[in-house]
């Protein structure tokens, strides 16, 4: 038991230091000590872009465990398998309850899968349209309305997203100059042709697009949170 505990401490230390390849080597070299560490192994493989191997381990460990389902969902999302990702995000929510981050990811997956009606129903159930919703939720909800051609509603949501992000950054004591320049926040405007919307780049992947009424919305990219930190 002591050897197993020591190995686990070493494995977690390697992961926290971002030394994923070494962690994988340690797991593969110490099969008995690594028993039951499928999640940690899969997480390292995910970080090394070895998605098929990571998914196989998570399937073996069981997707009825919330963290396994969450990581598998993130991998499916990365691979562009959005419908499956949405299913797995919701499995994880069912196991451990929802959170702002899980709602962002589920909504992003549903919108990316083209399941806009399901996305809007999920948003209503999750309270994503409430005034207290965070930037990413509002942004993803706007993407759903754009997919449905409801550009007026999308414009309002994008404006609320912008305001929410400003309030959040102000509360975190960003200066006005940092908000305008360092975080690259601009405005949301509508013209006679459609919607011109500018999104925030605050370390997550955000995009800037002009959407024409009745035009192709295939370049819309909802935001999801990746697993950049180990839990």
Image (cartoon, rainbow, N blue to C red):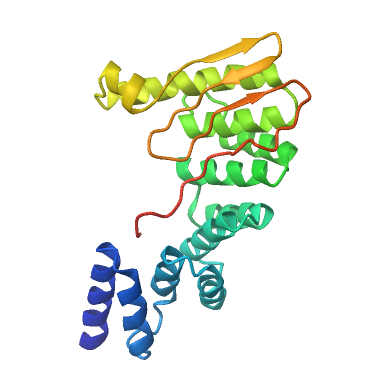
The residue shown at (55%, 70%) is 55
Q: Residue at x 74, y 37 (%)?
A: 117
Depth order, front residue of 3/114: 114
How far from the left and from the top, in percent, is residue 59?
57, 74
Left or right: 12 as drawn, with respect to 45: left
Q: Is residue 125 visible?
A: yes
Q: Horizontal and vertical percent for residue 180?
A: 35, 19
Residue drawn where x is 62% and y is 12% of the image: 190
Q: Quadrant of the C terminus?
A: bottom left
The quarter holding residue 186 reads: top left
Viewer-proximal residue, 175 or 13? 175
| Up/down of 2 relative to 77, above or below | below
Does residue 212 sit above or below 46 in this rendering?
above
Q: Is residue 141 above or below residue 162?
A: below
Q: Quadrant of the N terminus?
A: bottom left
Q: Whole-percent x and y of residue 108?
A: 59, 42
Give left or right: position of 38 versus 230: right
Query: Is residue 204 found left or right of 208 in the rendered image?
Result: left
């Amino acid at each position: 038991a002591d050897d197993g505990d020591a190995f686990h401490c070493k494995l977690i230390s390697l992961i926290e230091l971002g030394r994923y390849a070494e962690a994988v080597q340690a797991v593969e070299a110490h099969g008995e000590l690594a028993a039951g560490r499928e999640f940690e192994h899969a997480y390292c493989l995910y970080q090394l872009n070895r998605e098929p191997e990571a998914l196989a381990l998570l399937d073996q460990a069981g997707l009825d465990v919330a963290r396994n389902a969450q990581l598998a969902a993130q991998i499916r999302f990365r691979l562009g398998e959005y419908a499956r990702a949405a299913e797995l995000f919701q499995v994880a929510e069912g196991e451990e309850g929802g959170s702002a981050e899980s709602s962002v990811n589920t909504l992003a997956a549903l919108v990316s899968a083209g399941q806009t009606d399901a996305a809007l129903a999920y948003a209503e159930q999750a309270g994503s349209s409430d005034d207290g919703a965070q930037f990413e939720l509002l942004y993803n909800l706007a993407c759903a309305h754009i997919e449905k051609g409801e550009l007026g509603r999308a414009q309002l949501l994008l404006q609320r997203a912008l305001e929410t992000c400003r309030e959040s950054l102000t509360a975190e004591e960003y200066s006005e100059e940092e908000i305008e320049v360092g975080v690259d926040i601009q405005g949301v405007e509508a013209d006679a042709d459609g919607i011109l919307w500018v999104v925030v780049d605050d370390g997550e992947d955000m995009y800037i697009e002009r959407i024409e009424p009745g035009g192709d919305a295939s370049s819309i990219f909802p935001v999801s949170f990746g697993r950049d930190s180990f839990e």
